[in-house]
Amino acid sequence: MRTNFFLPCLLLVALSAVGCKKNAAPAAAGGGGFAVQVVAVPARQQAVSETVSLVGSVTPNESIEVLAEADGLVKEIGFEEGQRVEKGSLLVALEETKLAAQLAETEANLLLAKNSFDRVKDLFRDKLISKQEYDQASGSFAANEAGVDLKRRLLKDARVTAPFSGITGARRISPGQVISKATPLTVLVDLDTVKVEMGVPERYLSQVRIGQTLEFHVAAYPATVFKGEVYFISPQLDTGTRTALVKARIVNPDGRLKVRTYTVHVDLNVAGVSADDIAAHGGLVMEALADLDEANPELQDWTVSMDAAQGRCEIDLTVTAAHHADAVALAHSLVRTAIHAAGGATPEGAATGGAAQAPRYDDAENAMKVFA
């Protein structure tokens, strides 16, 4: 992405006027003198712009990886991949039966501890029990109160909701799956407003201001000029590059500006068919990816290379995603779908139509490599 800063400065234009005095004596005859015509222009100040072109990156306003906060069985998934969700919307619900029963048990123990503590308070006021007995009853009541609070929080953690409005990423779990705490569920990205980040050389920092306008272009829309407003200038310089991080906000209501672009290299072994069939099958995979492109705007570009002699297939996908892991998940899904649509088989599924001589694709060593 190319960013242009417009840095204001003043240009002083001063042109001198040359002429003759009104009453000057004429030149002596034969002296070779002659009159010179001039155009007088008044000196003035005029604003001009100095443009500085920089390379930056587009980042979402907010972006998180949604993780499970409790162990349990996935009961409900409340979103579709790529769906817009509002703040507070249910994303994932875990089975709550055990947690609800545990909460009921701790609430019953709390009620018992409270009644016991109330009686102890009366006895202690009448000096019928010791301070130690009073403290024990008080501590038991407080411990049961804390236990109830903990169980209520665990029950709340069984329902994962969206912390802000945004677009969900690829789904990484399935209904009925048993997950543990901190299991990745999906990603959530707010693209209503995006940020542009760039390193501004030290020599230009004195001319950069909060609220200043910048213009930039992105590869997806080369003819469109986007405008943003600077809201952050780092107080520190990068010691290696002598640049300061500068950020600008851009309103993005139509979602045209996407987040980071990743190139995912997929290396696969192909077996089960002749070398000629392997080469021909590459064209079918290419056609399947072209069909997927229409339904998957995240897929920006792709290439397929078939090495019949070595029995290998290499696929390079350029995708937009919020996170490295999301790019991998998307590329994995697209490649498998394309192979199946082309009549091939993968470890995740058989070939379409049950073809007996369908190519079998298996992950090679270090099958996926991702380049940001």
Image: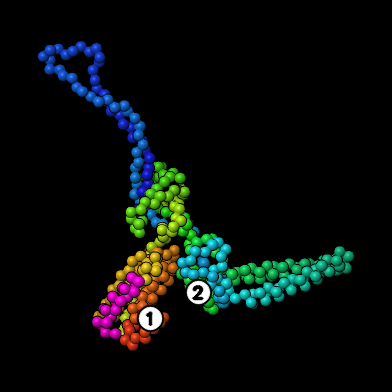
Secondary structure under the numbered disc 2 in the rendered image: loop
The tag earlier along the polypeptide, 1 or 2, is 2
The answer to whether residue 209 of the structure is visible from this angle is: yes
Q: Is residue 285 magenta?
A: yes
For residue 294, side relative to residue 63 (left or right):
left
Which amino acid type is shown beneath numbered disc 2?
Answer: Ile
The residue located at (30%, 70%) in the rendering is: 303
Q: Which residues are magenta?
A: 273-291
Q: Is residue 364 magenta?
A: no
- For the image, the number of numbered tags is 2
- Percent across and percent down for residue 61 are 48, 57
Residue 346, which numbered label?
A: 1
- Percent across and percent down for residue 60 are 45, 58
Mark 2: few/some/many CA within 10 Å (<14, 14-19, 20+): some
- Quadrant in the picture for residue 223: bottom left
Q: Which residue is mark 2?
A: 173
Residue 292, which numbered label?
A: none
- Percent across and percent down for residue 53 are 34, 49
Secondary structure under the numbered disc 1 in the rendered image: loop
For residue 257, side relative to residue 310 (left or right):
right
Q: Are marks 1 and 2 in contact (CB under 8 Å)?
A: no
The residue located at (29%, 27%) in the rendering is: 41
Secondary structure mostly seen in the magenta stretch: helix
Q: CA distance from mark 1 to mark 2?
A: 20 Å
